[in-house]
């Protein structure tokens, strides 16, 4: 484990201990809500009996949903606390899974073509080189397998609702594959009981659209679709300078589905 992985792990242990939203196991799923959780765009298809890797995707959310849909799930995540949340969720539903601590940049423990689907949560922005991860995913996916990933909208790096100018949201970061240096590196964690904490988040790195799209195409992935998220209703009129208003102007995340189709 290198210095970056150690730091990222430490930050995620603290975020999970504070019960950040992404660390709360989903304990009220049925098959319909499970499908909505992992496949809202209707791309994934039937995963019953398939081997699925939840990559850097601990927290007891996607693992539970995919298992409820009949997949054989393996979770790989840096944070032991996040992995424990997966254990809690699977135990809640009486399901089993393989839960492993590890770095998304090193999938050497897995056999070649081991998985039918790699479901990659929002996490590739925590490593500086997306291509390193894409190489790992390509090796462990079987031909015809699916790769789902989500990453930060690269045009909006370092921008959020705090930067409302009275007329728009200020773009602050150079458009490049580089580290996003935020003067306020803390995440606001709002607990279910109404309490609030500020916890230092992990380092984040921007990955441009061309880096991601061309990087996948160059590795024999066929793009199935790309979606902006989240989206509010067209008639929504939130107050400027709020997170909800920011979402109507600038979707902060992009979700992509691709199929591995080697020549």
Image: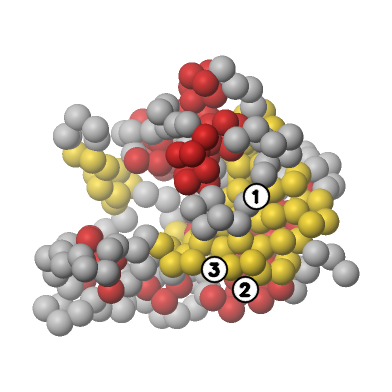
Tell me: residue 213, above or below residue 81: below
Q: Residue furthest front?
A: 32
Please tell me which residue is depicted at 44% across the width and 67% down the height of the picture.
228
Assign a secondary structure to mark 3. strand
> What is the C-alpha distance between the residues marked 1 and 2?
22 Å
**From the viewer's perspective, is the residue at label 3 or at label 1 nearer?**
1
Query: If the image is split into quadrants, where does the C terminus sit?
Result: bottom right
Dot 1 corresponds to which residue?
45
In front of the other: 16 or 62: 62
Q: Quadrant of residue 233?
A: bottom left
Dot 3 corresponds to which residue?
226
Q: Is residue 181 visible?
A: no
Please tell me which residue is depicted at 44% across the width and 56% down the height of the picture.
203
Dot 2 corresponds to which residue?
213
* Label 3–label 2 contact, CB within 8 A: yes
Assign a secondary structure to mark 2. helix
Please tell me which residue is depicted at 64% across the width and 67% down the height of the picture.
224
**From the viewer's perspective, is the residue at label 3 or at label 2 nearer?**
3
Measured from the top left, where is residue 60 in percent x and y? 48, 32
Give neighbour class at mark 3: few <14, some 14-19, many 20+ (Cα, 10 Å): some
């Amino acid at each position: 484990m290198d210095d970056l992985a150690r730091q990222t792990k430490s930050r995620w242990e603290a975020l999970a201990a504070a019960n950040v939203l992404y660390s709360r196991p989903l304990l009220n799923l049925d098959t319909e809500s499970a499908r909505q959780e992992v496949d809202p765009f209707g791309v994934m298809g039937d995963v019953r009996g398939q081997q699925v890797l939840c990559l850097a995707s601990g927290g007891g959310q996607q693992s539970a949903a995919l298992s409820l849909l009949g997949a054989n799930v393996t979770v790989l995540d840096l944070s032991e606390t996040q992995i424990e949340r997966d254990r809690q969720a699977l135990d809640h539903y009486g399901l089993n899974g393989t839960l492993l601590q590890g770095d998304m940049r090193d999938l050497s423990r897995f056999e070649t073509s081991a998985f039918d689907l790699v479901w990659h949560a929002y996490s590739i922005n925590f490593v500086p080189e997306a291509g390193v991860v894409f190489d790992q995913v390509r090796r462990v996916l079987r031909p015809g397998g699916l790769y789902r990933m989500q990453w930060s909208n690269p045009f909006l790096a370092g921008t959020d609702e705090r930067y409302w100018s009275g007329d728009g949201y200020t773009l602050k970061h150079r458009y490049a594959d580089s580290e996003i240096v935020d003067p306020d590196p803390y995440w606001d964690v709002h607990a279910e009981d109404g309490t609030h904490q500020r916890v230092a988040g992990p380092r984040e790195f921007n990955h441009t659209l061309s880096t991601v799209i061309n990087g996948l195409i160059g590795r024999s992935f066929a793009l199935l679709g790309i979606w902006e998220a989240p989206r509010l209703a067209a008639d929504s009129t939130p107050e400027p300078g709020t997170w909800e208003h920011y979402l109507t102007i600038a979707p902060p995340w992009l979700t992509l589905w691709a199929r591995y189709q080697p020549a």
